[in-house]
Image (cartoon, rainbow, N blue to C red):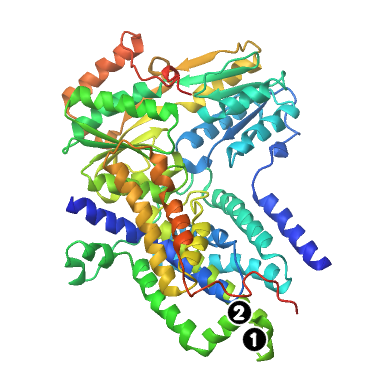
Amino acid sequence: MADALGAFLEGTVRTATPLAFAALGEALVERSGVINIGLEGSIIAGALGGVVTAGGAGTGVGLAAALVAGAAVAAVFALFAVKLRADQIITGTAVTLLSLGLTGTLYRSAFGTGGAALGTPTLGPLAIPGLSAIPLVGPALFAQPITTYLAMALVPLASWWLARTHAGLALRACGENPAAARAAGIAVGRVQTAAIIFGGALGGLAGGTLVLAQAGTFVEGMSAGRGFIAIAIVVLGRWQPLGVGLAALLFGAASALQFAFQAMGWQLPYQLFLASPYLLTLLALALARSRFVAPAALGKIVEA
Amino acid sequence: MLIRRVAVTLLAVLAACGKGEKPAAAGHDAAKSGIRVALLTPGPISDQAWNGGAYAGLMRIKDSLGAQVSHVQTKSPQDFDENFRQYGSQGYDLVFGHGFEFQEAAARVAKDFPKTIYVTTSGHTVAANLAGMDFAFEEGAYLAGMVAASVSKSGILGCIGGTELPPVKASFKAFELGAKSVNPKAQVLTGYIGNWEDVSAGKEQALAYIARGADVLFQNADAAGLGIIQAARERKVFAVGANADQNGVAPETIIGSVVIDLPHALLTVAREVQEKHFTPRVISLGLKDEVVRWTVNPKLANAVPANITKSVDSVRALLRSGSMHLPVGATSDSSR
């Protein structure tokens, strides 16, 4: 039983890592007043970037390429949504569809119809001496690939940056009251563009994590809706980095629970377990009462 | 305002192009004598399994028969009807819907395009221009179960599928029967990922099984199955390949593969269509036709006890001769 519990906790953290990256990025984007539904596109682009480069150049380059690929997709979104002030939801949807299709085509042109199979190197777990020996939670928290530690570090960093720096304040001002922000001399469009590109880079990192820390291969459509789950996580985490980190863990736990239930051999409809993360979101959103609310100007088009 | 609208339209057009091959993309300049054959797959053809095998079949049809071919990957069940109709209206001679899930759409569309023959693989609906192929995948799965139980130390085996399609369910049932024929105490865990692409979820499901003590994993999850194989490889347990010969995907991990020779099966049907002696029926193919095979990975053949190899051979002979019947067939599942 302890084994099963340990496996469940490890699965929770593993599953939560890419979600945390994507959701943290999206949280910053939304705090700047933009909702980027194209996040899924950044994730799948990051996954492709990772698989294309890691085979020849190693996992480090793979992660960097994932970052760049995710940022590049986000830049397309920024061009349309910020520069040309197109509708953010429509633009985001188009970016997602474009990326899902294009990555499949590019993957086939890079690897042929046979694909990369399992030839991609992966980041093994990196056990932190001492800490990883703690019973139960040790392996779950401190014997993970490096990407997990990076996600853990990003949560307090983003929290601090958002609350305590001038740049963080400027970002929040854009999301709450862009007109006032402009009056105060903030280049709203530039701040939002930077936030979108950074958010896309984190989305790309999420995709890179899927390939390089988990699957060891690329599959068309392997992002499997994580971009949209990340957007739900942002809402559940009330746009606060710490809240988002915890919400990502909760989602990871819900998925890991589903795997654990099935491994227990319980004769219940598996669809019930598959639905559990989503039911959890609905429940949490319905019950959550918080002083933190969505940025006032979220999704609004800022007129020049 | 105008520039905004132009921008969005442009992006939408780009997105539509990105969605992949258009059915119309097939070369019209190809030889006029050849038949036109189309294939709809439910997933990416780079899965090295179910979809990859069918695509190889399509390529073989093109090479052997000089046919004009076209492939489209459907994104959702709503696409099934639409793509079937597209090919029907373009006058294709033969359209394959690759999987059990295509049956109903094929039956709906076939009525409207009497000149096009629709064939669904692992389907069993038949009409004037509608046929099904029924692969006795479960026969191979039974043999795989025998071998899996013989190489398992824990006696716990795992089966992981994409979604709970009747043919997948039947193959897991057969795997379990095979395993229990060798080790009556063997415990077989069965689970589903919920889709066929989430390779990372496949891996997590496999890791959860391995944590439960499973040391042989039978997967039938197409592209997501690669994640299951990856988990087995990392944790040094065995996996079983499915739908194509996957022994080479992870030679040190895959004990053997339950192969469906999709290229051979698809080519056989296409040839009948070209030679104009195709009759609508359920085309049953199994061990006896060499279309379904159980192929032990030669690199791991030593891990399989000699007496098991012998009993596998005799069970195979019984199944081929028809004197042994597995009570698990997808067609015997009347619930759907």
Up-down relation of residue B154 to residue B116 (above or below) = below
C-beta proximity under 8 Å, tags 1 and 2 = yes
Could you tell me which chain the residue with mark 1 belongs to?
Answer: A
Q: Which residue is mark 2?
A: A176
Q: Residue at x 64, y 55 (%)?
A: A98
| Quadrant hosting residue B154 | top left
Q: Earlier in the sequence, mark 1 or mark 2?
A: 2
- From this viewpoint, is residue A149 visible? yes
Q: Nearer the viewer, residue A55 or A152?
A: A152
- Residue A164 in the image: x percent, y percent? 46, 88
Q: Quadrant of the C terminus of chain A?
A: bottom right
Q: Residue at x 51, y 71 (%)?
A: A27
Using the numbered discs, state the Cα–Cα distance from disc 1 to disc 2 in whole angstroms.
9 Å
Residue type pointed to by label 1: Ala
**Residue A236 left/right relative to B89:** left
Q: Which residue is mark 1?
A: A181
Mark 2 neighbour class, 10 Å CA radius: few under 14, some 14 to 19, many 20 or more: some
| Quadrant hosting residue B206 | top left
Up-down relation of residue B293 to residue A165 (above or below) = above
Q: Nearer the viewer, residue B194 or B48?
A: B194
Judged from the image, the secondary structure of the residue bearing numbered disc 1 is helix
- Residue A52 in the image: x percent, y percent? 49, 58
- Residue A111 in the image: x percent, y percent? 51, 49
Q: Nearer the viewer, residue A283 or A239?
A: A283
Could you tell me which chain the residue with mark 2 belongs to?
Answer: A
Judged from the image, the secondary structure of the residue bearing numbered disc 2 is helix
